[in-house]
Image (spheres, grey):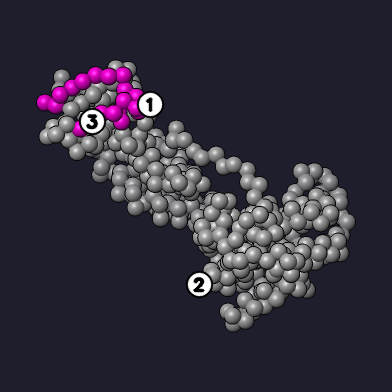
Amino acid sequence: MPETRRKNLTDAVIRSLSPEPGKKYLVYDKRAPGLHVAVLATGKRVFYFRYSRRRRPRYYRIGPTDVLKVDDARAVALGLARRLLLEPGFDPAAERKANRGAVTFAELCTRYVEEYARKKNKSWKHSAGLIENHAIPVIGDLAAAEITKPDVKRLLAKYDETPSMKEHVRLAISAVFTWAIKEEMLKVNPCSGVEGHKAKSRERVLSDKEIRTLWSAADQFGLVVSTALKVILLTGQRPGEVAHMRRDHIKDGWWEMPGEFVKNKHSHRVWLTEKVRELLAELDDEQGSTKPGCVFANSRGSPVRGLDEAMRKLSERCFKDDPVRPHDLRRTFGTTVTKLKHGRAAMNRILNHRSGDAVGDIYDRHDYADDDKRIMEAVTGHLLRLAEGVSGNVVSFGDSSN
């Protein structure tokens, strides 16, 4: 039998446990009965829960210590001990073995998309993509009922350096389990209690020199992506709305977005300056199409994807110390509106920010078309001069200094 020891386990204590050649040993926790760490000769350390059935010892694998903290492992052990006390006949290891023939996580995800997400969730394609690309390769073959918090933490640990992606993946996985619980297919959501990433409010605005850098660097991503990024900067509209721009929504120089194409569901009009129209015309010439449909289309005619990825790569080269995201281009436009003394009300109106005064929004029927057109011309002109270096703020490619 492996040698057994007993300690008040902490993460630091576990890290200090050294392997011993040719054998494994067990270190039991003084606080949670049955919880112990198996230290293998290879150096691997794994949490287990020991219990007995019919006076025989049984072992339930909780997970590796490099993924799971001791407090989490202790919570699992105490939860199992509680179920053993309250549920006669409960056998954790036997239940896990029985679940191996049950529906896998990949199968559960397919049902979630077909039976729920596709009908109820407008962003289902994005969530399905996250699950398909990031979760299925790791836990797709596991029985859904067998997946534990350590499994989820092991999956998410891959994205510690990209906390925003980590949170998106966690939420996508959690939604599947939440639905399965409501459908009475599962009892537990293993994502519960897994710490999420709280997104910080961004204040990133490009400097004059950075605008010039971005304008030149964007061309490396091809005409569709680079034009989309430039249109976000020159119109201030949301990246997702620019990506879904349609030719049949452009009328007499105005981009008229129906509510279903707008994040806040309020229809919106944006004046397209001569430079923006030139960019769009160049794109049409390259694609050889002026038919109704997506302006920024991929090879299948669907709205372009990959703007975030393009900005990430661009930032790695040009803005390493302070990365730029597509939404920062919208924020830069809005800041320029107020910088040129047009006022916050004009900025909110052009960016389609709702005032919060529902009654005022309904009764304020003043036509701001002429004002908006004048402001768009002024702001776009200012940004364009910076982008093309007319004002003298010329920098070499890759210079992001302020």
Instruction: State yes or no: residue 10 in magenta.
Output: yes
Closer to the chain start, of discs 1 and 3, is: 3
Q: Residue 18 carries which label?
A: 3
Residue 38: image quadrant is top left
> What residue is shown at x 25% (from left), y 22% (from top)?
28
Task: Categorize mark 2 by other alpha carbons within 10 Å: few (<14), some (14-19), many (20+).
Answer: few
- The span from disc 2 to disc 1 (Cα, nearest Å) is 49 Å
Image height of 212 relative to 401, above or below: below
Q: Residue 300 carries which label?
A: 2
Task: Categorize mark 3 by other alpha carbons within 10 Å: few (<14), some (14-19), many (20+).
Answer: some
Name which residue type carries label 3: Ser
Magenta segment boundaries in residue numbering: 1-19
- The span from disc 1 to disc 3 (Cα, nearest Å) is 21 Å
Q: Locate the N terminus by quadrant.
A: top left
Residue found farthest to the right:
366
- Which one is in front, 400 or 133? 400
Locate residue 72 relative to residue 29 in the image: left or right.
right
